[in-house]
Amino acid sequence: MQALWRGGLGTTSVDALQNAIGIGRSSLYNAFNSKSELVRLAVDRYVTQSLAALETLFAQQGLAAAVEYLLVDAATSNSDGRGCLLLNGLIELHDADADTLQTVRDGLDRLAQLLVRKAEASANPVADPTAFAAKFIASMAGVRSLQRACLPPELARSIARDFSALVVAS
């Protein structure tokens, strides 16, 4: 997963994956059948880990505070500059590798479903949980771009807080 996150879902070579896992090419294909299968498993692991972390964060902080925390963190840290594996993959694969692109879309759909459930269960429910989820994902993509653009951190934080207010007001 880390090698794909660093190198890209479509562009990481089989050699790079072999080195990251520490196995030979034939062992890689015996274990995973194809590079596409390995990518699918890595994306699934990323999504599963992300959903678990989001469950914990929403339970601890509530909807509005969790959204603000996540957007501000993305605008300033952005997973140490790596961004989101799903959003990175969406951009990278927009017109190539339909199977892997569908895997990424399925991961985003799982994320959106969790966001809808959290919006519906919130002590202060939002008017349109589906719009909330879509706006959150779009805002996340936007603030991650701000971090990569190297905006001054306080400006990035301010914009992330503004986005957070818009998302929660859905």
Image: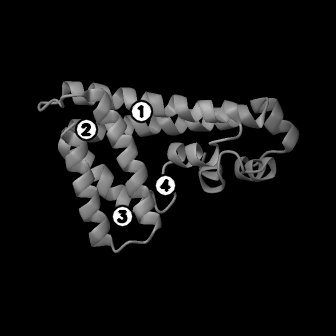
Instruction: Work out which quarter of the rendered image holds the C terminus and state it.
Output: top left
Residue 55 visible in image: no
From the image, tell me which residue sits under label 2: 58
Q: Is label 1 or label 2 in front?
A: 1
> Which of the numbered marks, if any, corresponds to residue 76?
3
Residue type at mark 3 is Thr
> Which of the numbered marks, if any, corresponds to residue 111?
1
Residue type at mark 1 is Leu
Tag 4–tag 2 contact (CB < 8 Å): no
Query: Which one is nearer the viewer's eye here, 105 or 29?
Result: 105
Residue type at mark 4 is Gly
Q: CA distance from mark 4 to mark 2?
A: 20 Å
Of the numbered discs 4 and 2, the one sitting upstream in the chain is: 2
Q: Which x, y percent locates residue 23? A: 79, 45
Of the numbered discs 2 and 3, the one sitting upstream in the chain is: 2
Q: Residues within 10 Å of mark 2 (few under 14, many from 20)?
A: some
Residue farthest bottom in this picture:
152
Q: CA distance from mark 4 to mark 1?
A: 16 Å
Residue 98 falls left or right of residue 168: right
Q: Residue at x 41, y 33 (%)?
A: 111
Q: CA distance from mark 1 to mark 2?
A: 13 Å
From the image, tell me which residue sits under label 4: 83
Q: Residue at x 75, y 49 (%)?
A: 22
Query: Which one is nearer the viewer's eye here, 154 or 28?
Result: 154
